C-alpha cells in the first residue's frame, strides 16, 4: 500500500478497510485481517493498524470479539459511507475543486470522464 502525505497513515488504513467493504471484497459480519497480518501486509507498525482499527470501532464499523478477532458490523455500510464522505470532503474535495477552477474545466467534461472511469473500472 502506498501512502499519501495526508491524511495520517492510520486514517488511510481505515479508509482502505472501508473500501474493501464497499467493494464487497470483505463481507458484512465477517472477520477481518488481524492487526499483525495487516501490519505485515502493508508494511507499517502494528500500533498504526491498531489506531486505525480503534477509529473504525469508534465509528461502529468493526467490533472486537475478544480472543477471536475483529469483525465487520452487520449494519456498517451506512456508517462507512458517512465516514468516507466526511474524509473525502475534508481532504480530497477541496483539492479537486481548486483544480477544476484553476484549469477552467467544464462539469460536462468531468461528468463524461467520470462515466468512462466507472465503466472501465467498476463493470457490473
Image (spheres, grey):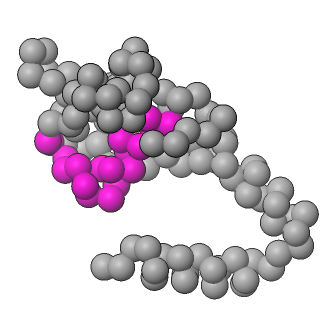
On the image, the x and y values in percent for residue 100 come to 81, 66
Q: Is residue 74 above or below residue 113?
A: above
Quarter that holds the N terminus: top left
On the image, the x and y values in percent for residue 22 come to 34, 55
Is residue 90 within the magenta segment? no
116 or 76, which is in the foreground?
A: 116
Q: What is the count of numbered marks?
A: 0
On the image, the x and y values in percent for residue 106 come to 80, 79
Q: Is residue 93 left or right of residue 67?
A: right
Can the viewer see residue 80? no
Q: Is residue 52 above or below residue 104?
A: above
Q: Is residue 41 above or below residue 112?
A: above
Q: Is residue 15 above or below residue 62?
A: below
Q: Is residue 11 left or right of residue 20?
A: right
- Determine the residue positioned at 25% across, 29% down: 37
- Determine the residue positioned at 73% across, 83% down: 109
Residue 15 figure quarter: top left
Can the viewer see residue 39? yes
- Determine the residue positioned at 55% across, 38% down: 3
The magenta stretch is 12-30
87 or 2, which is in the foreground?
A: 2
Amino acid at each position: 500500500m502506498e501512502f499519501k502525505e495526508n491524511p495520517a497513515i492510520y486514517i488511510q488504513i481505515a479508509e482502505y478497510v472501508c473500501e474493501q467493504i464497499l467493494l464487497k471484497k470483505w463481507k458484512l459480519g465477517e472477520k477481518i485481517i488481524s492487526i499483525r497480518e495487516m501490519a505485515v501486509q502493508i508494511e507499517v507498525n502494528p500500533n498504526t493498524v491498531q489506531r486505525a482499527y480503534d477509529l473504525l470501532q469508534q465509528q461502529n464499523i468493526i467490533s472486537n470479539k475478544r480472543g477471536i478477532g475483529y469483525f465487520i458490523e452487520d449494519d456498517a455500510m451506512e456508517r462507512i459511507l458517512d465516514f468516507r464522505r466526511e474524509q473525502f470532503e475534508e481532504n480530497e474535495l477541496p483539492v479537486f475543486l481548486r483544480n477544476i477552477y484553476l484549469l477552467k474545466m467544464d462539469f460536462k467534461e468531468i461528468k463524461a470522464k467520470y462515466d468512462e472511469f466507472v465503466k472501465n473500472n467498476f463493470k457490473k
